[in-house]
Each structure stands twice: as structure tokens, then as C-alpha cells.
Image (cartoon, rainbow, N blue to C red):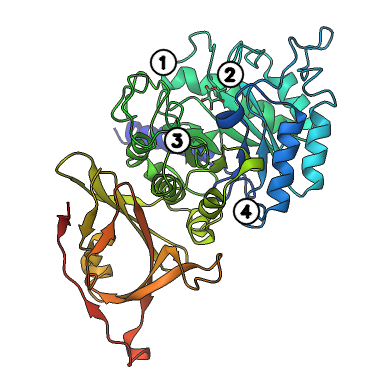
Amino acid sequence: MLTTTALALSTLALRVSAEVKMANHRRPGLADTPPLGWNSWNKFGCDISQDTILDAAKVIADSGLQAVGYEYVIIDDCWHADERDKNTSAPLAHPERFSKGIKYIADEVHKLGLKFGIYSSAGTHTCAGRFASLGYEEIDAKTYAEWDVDYLKYDNCYNEGQSGTPEASFKRYNKMSKALKKTGRPIVYALCNWGEDGPWNWAPTISETWRISGDVWDSFDTVDDYCPCETMIDCKMSGFHCSVSKIIEFSASLGQKAGPGHWNDMDMLEVGNGGQTYDEYATHFSMWALAKSPLILGHDLTAMTNETYEIVTNKAIIAVNQDKLGKPAQRRWKRKIEGGGTLQMWSGQLDNGDTVVALVNLSPRNLSVAVDIADMFDAPERDAKTKTYEFFDLWERADENDLQSWGRSVGVHQNSFSAPVQLRSHQTKVFRAHPINLSSNPDLVPQQVVFKTNSDN
Ligand code: GAL
């Protein structure tokens, strides 16, 4: 009996150590924080050339985007020639649109101090019907490494039915993970299987990021049957045309699966593509940042408006995304609003002991929201009641004359906010709460607060 138990225990220990080994995919220095960059797909689709990519790279370097952290310049689908090299089977770039070859683009991007990404699919063809990597993983990974690629987005089209169970998907995607590692070049592996087969449960063992849903589109909350699921847990049809509000909903339960070196990818940003208002795009950007999604710009950088620039260079919001603790914010509550939509509170811990708090108005009404500080924490009794916080509104500037001074103090508060927070329809307010030690600040008189939620129209 004892022997059987001992045997069972040692088998268990072996299994656990194998799992631990598997879980130890993390490659320090690669996606320690969510990748920031630009990708050609959302704006340009297949209408790309080397100029499209290099023009975008130049704007990143010259406009201040690189200075706030944007780093990866990624060519999506359609960089391909009609077929692979007939003799070696190596991938080839389109001879006219990319006449100087992919290595040339990578070199130019690197000269600007940026990193370079490319796209393929774990299928026979890419989603736009170009040749893809299923069965060609080794030659493709080797070629990407020779081209000095730093990031691979790896899609799911034409997968020959090798999906439908986590095992099938894992096996197919693991082939490219292994091939990339074999090259010896540190290439961020961005898995894009649209949340099929629950990648958050197995992708962390083989990749740095994984898409959680069907494709985003430039709409705040349009309901579209092409994106049919209400949650991605056990969703059997990821689809596409997923609105920003829907992807926020999908991400809410998945934050627990992410951390340094492994991130939920909510898809590329639509900010700047024209289909949403300032408040909607700021909500989109804020929630992608708080959920620790990669922030991959998807608009035409060469025709960027001041408003778009202002949103995507908000350093205080980017700092939340890039916080080195790497803990996605959690949704603390979600309330239905009469007339449709919801009001939500999200919050998360930051590395220096601050807490980030978002009030998210996904309803068509303007709202007046009372804030209970205790709601911000897992253990309110321990964390909130004894503490006093100075709150900074990260979408307001400390100095109106300094456009980059994001984060205006809105006072010192204990227990709750002293006045309800006003939120426009589809607006998100993001606060950074910094704990204050009252004994070393005897002059500070915290404002006491009231808590209730009213809609004012
Ligand atoms: C989709 C993918 C998009 C884009 C497109 C290219 O499957 O989710 O982000 O890469 O393919 O054809």
C-alpha cells in the first residue's frame, strides 16, 4: 500500500515538474511588458508596399511615438510573392511591392532603432490566400531569422481542420514555436488563433502573446452576428467584426492568465481610423492598456490627427500598460444602466504600490458615479479602510500648457470620493491612486466621500 502511494506520489511529482518545465517558456527580455508598435492590416489590408512600411517606421521614429515606447513595425498579410522559391521552398517577398526584399526593410527599420515584425499563418494559406507555413515551419523560421525579424504574428486560416481541441491547436502552433527557438534569434511569437481552443491555457507555454478573440473592427458597440459569442470561454465561433465593447467584455475574465512574458492580445488598435469618437477611442486605448494587451497601432501614421496623437501618446496610460509588475487590471463590478449598456469599475495593482482605477461608461447615457475606494481592492478591509490616497486623473493634464503632462491631481481621498465622478456616454476615466501617509503629512485633510450611482439624463 505504502509502495503504491509512494509510486503515485513520485509519478505526480514527475508530472508536476514536467508541467513546471513546460510553463517555464518565458524568455527574459522578450515581451517582459506588452509589445508596443504598429501593424499594417487595420488600415491598409493587402494594399501595402515597402513604402507603406518604411513611411510608418519613419513617423514612429520622428514624431515622438518611439520616445513613448512604440517599437515594433509589423507587416501583416500580403507581403508575399505568388509562390515560394521553386528550388529551396524558402518564402519570397512580392517582387514589385517589396522589390528590395524583406531583409532590406528589416535593416532600414533597425537603423531607426526600431524592431521589425512579419506575418504568416499556421495553415496552408494566409487569410488573404497567400502561401503560409503549415509544413514549412523550419524553413520559414530560418528565413525570418536570416531576414533579422524580431516578431512573428502567426494566424489561423486554412489550418486543415487541425483545431477544435486545445491539443490539436497546441500541436500545430508548437511547431513554429520550436522552429523559432531553433534559429537562436529572439523572435517574439505572437499567436493569432482568435481565442479558439482557449489559447490562454496553453499558449503561455509556447508564445509571448495570443489573440483572445475574432478580429476587432472600428466600431464601439455595434452588435454583429459575425462576432456571435458573448464570452470567449468555450466560444465555438470566434468570427470577426468584434466591437471594442465586446472585446473589453471578452478580456474581463482572462486577466488572470497574463503576466510578464505572456499576454492576452485584444487585437490591434483602431484608434485613428475614423469610426469612433474621441471618448470611444480613449476608452479603447485605456482598456487595452489596463488589460495589458499589446498596444499595436493600426492607423495611417502619415495622416495622424492631433486628437489621435494625443490619445496614443498619453504617457500616463502607457505607463500603466508597461508597468513592470505586469498585472492586468480586474473588473470589480459591472452595473446595468437603464436604457442599455453598463457602467464598470476596473482596478489593478502597480509596481510602486499605486492602484490604477478605471470607471468605464459603456452606456448611451451621461452618468454621475460615486466611488467607493474599498471597491478597488481584493481585500478592502485590509487595503482600503486604513489608507488615504491621492488620485490623479490620467486623461487630464497637470499643466494645461504642457501637452505631455498627463495626470492631474484630483485630491486626497479616504474611503470614497468627495464628489461623484461625471462620465460622458462611452467615456472612461482612469485614475492612479497613490497611497498617502497621513502621519508624515499632518497638514493634509482628506475629503470624505459619498457612494451612489445615478444617471443624470
Ligand atoms: C486575420 C487576422 C487579422 C489579419 C488578417 C490578415 O485572421 O486576425 O488580424 O492578420 O487575418 O489576412
Kindly identify which residue carries mark 1: 164
Assign the N terminus to one quadrant of the image.
top left
**Mark 3 and mark 4 residues within 8 Å of each other at the beta carbon:** no
Residue at the spot 64% in from the left edge and 52% down from the top edge: 65
Cβ of mark 2 under 8 A from ligand 1: no
Q: Which of marks 3 and 2 is nearer the N terminus?
A: 2
State how far apart marks 3 and 2 are (Cα). 31 Å
Image quadrant of ligand 1?
A: top right
Q: Which residue is drawn at 59% across and 26% down?
A: 154
Q: Which residue is tagged 4? A: 69
Real-space Cα separation, disc 1 to disc 2, in angstroms: 14 Å
Q: Nearer the viewer, mark 2 or mark 4?
A: 4
How far is the residue under mark 3 from the one under mark 4? 25 Å
The span from disc 1 to disc 3 (Cα, nearest Å) is 34 Å
Q: Does the residue labelled 1 lie within 8 Å of ligand 1?
A: no
Tell me the residue that label 3 is attached to: 275
Circle 4: is it few (<14), some (14-19), or many (20+) Cα within 10 Å?
Answer: some
Query: Which element carries disc 4, helix, strand or loop?
Result: loop
Location of mark 2 (residue)? 122
Who comes first in sequence, dot 1 or dot 4?
Answer: 4
Q: Nearer the viewer, residue 203 or 431?
A: 431
Residue 358 found in image quarter: bottom left
